[in-house]
Image (tube, rainbow, N blue to C red):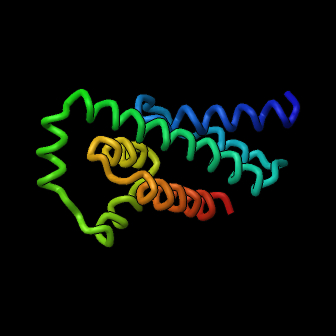
Amino acid sequence: MNKSELYALLFTDSFTSNLAINTNLEFIVYSMKTFGGYNVIHLIALSSAAMSLAFCANYLLGMVLSFAFKQSSIEINEKFKLDFKYLVFVLLLSAVPFFGKFISLFAGFLRINILKVLPVCISAKICYYLVTLL
């Protein structure tokens, strides 16, 4: 395999492992770092781009579930109405490897504004990549 194929595999693995319907973790990111020979900036950039798309897909899946369970989502949203300063701390949990992918799903289910959710979730995961890969 040449490097472009390996980077495509990295993008695909990062995307599918960050979807809420998948239970896998991002093994290829750590494998590529361990074996070396790859640019860490490229690893972080491609993983972050794939993760961003996966978070958008999870958010949209949450919106679909919200419409399917409309009455339940309205009741839950009224009970858990959080101020944005507290919501940021909850959204920062999206950096946690397995459970973080469900944060954007639940944000979509609760119909929290996507312009508030995605920048916090994406920056949290990028910080996670920076800490683990550098």
Q: Is residue 126 left or right of residue 31?
A: left
Q: Residue 36 at x, y = what percent? A: 79, 49
- Relative to 55, say whether 132 is above or below: below
- x and y percent of residue 38 in the render? 81, 48
Camera-side residue of 122 and 110? 110
Quadrant for the C terminus in the image = bottom right
Q: Where, by quadrant of the figure, is residue 131 drawn?
A: bottom right
Residue 95 visible here: no
Q: Is residue 78 left or right of residue 123?
A: left
Q: Seen in the image, is 4 located left or right of residue 12?
A: right
Above or below residue 39? Residue 63 is above
Residue drawn at point x = 29 percent, y = 41 percent: 109
Q: Depth check: 42 or 49 in front?
A: 49
Q: Residue 94: tell me if it is visible.
A: yes
Q: Residue 18 or 58: which is nearer the viewer?
A: 58
Question: In which quadrant will I find the N terminus?
Answer: top right
Residue 65 position in % (x across, y down): 29, 31
Q: Where residue 26 sits in the image (x, y, percent)?
A: 57, 40
Nearer the observer, 39 or 113: 113
Kindly identify the residue that appears in the image at 70 percent across and 52 percent down. Answer: 45
Q: Residue at x 39, y 33 (%)?
A: 61
Residue extending furthest toward the bottom: 85
Number of numbered discs on residues: 0
**Is 71 positioned to the left or the right of 55 in the image?**
left
